[in-house]
Amino acid sequence: MRKNIESVIVKAGIEILVFILIGILTLGSNVIVPNNTGFSFTIFGFAAVVFYYLLTGSSLKNFITLGTLLALLLVIIFKTSDEALVLIRNFCWFPFIGLMVYYISLLEKKAWFKLSKLWIAAVWFLGFAAVYIVMALLNIYIFRFYGISARVNLFFYLSHAVKIGGVLGIGIGLGKLLEGLFIKGKLSEA
């Protein structure tokens, strides 16, 4: 049991390190600065990795319970405002990330998914791009945090969402590929 927990921590650590490094290289160092809005990149990536291992390592009920507690904890610790609407919006990210992780875990069980390692990075890319697009639309049309104007139109927000979500997804996907190689290498050495 202890060895399994250590293995999960190593795998998750590799994935987190890789997506943060890719985030820094493509989006800048603001992804690791806690008082910067870019830090949400790191929070959402961390949550996705933890959600993934919660889901694959325990029951669906534990995933939902522990995932909800983690989401609440992250929203409270890293709250940017005391305004209820902002807190609700910030919490909304986590159910979408949880759904994405759930569907990715279902895809991983399919035989065709295992044919190509490239699928892992592609699915994480598409998943996070979709989450960021959904949240951009919610921020525009439901929460009204983003305004549409002649200078800043819907395409701007959607392209920005695909860029940030895509970088995060590619980072986690490549992290999963690298941790797979690292773990395989360690097993072959033993």
Image: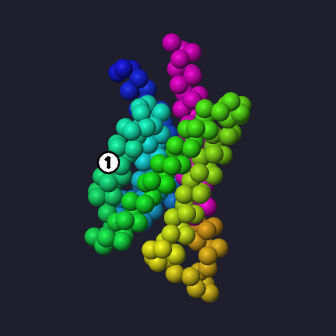
- 145 vs 183: above or below: below
Which residue is drawn at the image coordinates 47% and 33% (left, top)?
Answer: 56
Q: Quadrant of residue 163?
A: bottom right
Percent position of residue 112, x then y: 71, 33
Percent position of residue 172, x then y: 54, 44
Q: Three-letter amino acid code at disc 1?
A: Leu
Q: Nearer the viewer, residue 114 or 26?
A: 114
Which image quarter holds the N terminus? Answer: top left
Task: Give the residue at mark 1.
Answer: 69
**Which residues are the magenta region?**
161-190
- 49 vs 40: above or below: above
- 184 vs 112: above or below: above
Which residue is drawn at the image coordinates 69% and 39% (left, top)?
Answer: 118
Q: Quadrant of residue 90?
A: bottom left
Q: Does residue 162 show up magenta in the picture? A: yes
Q: Nearer the viewer, residue 172 or 73?
A: 73
Q: Quadrant of residue 148?
A: bottom right
Q: Does residue 23 show up magenta in the picture? A: no
Count all numbered tags in the image, as a single digit.
1
Does dot 1 land on a helix, a strand or a loop? helix
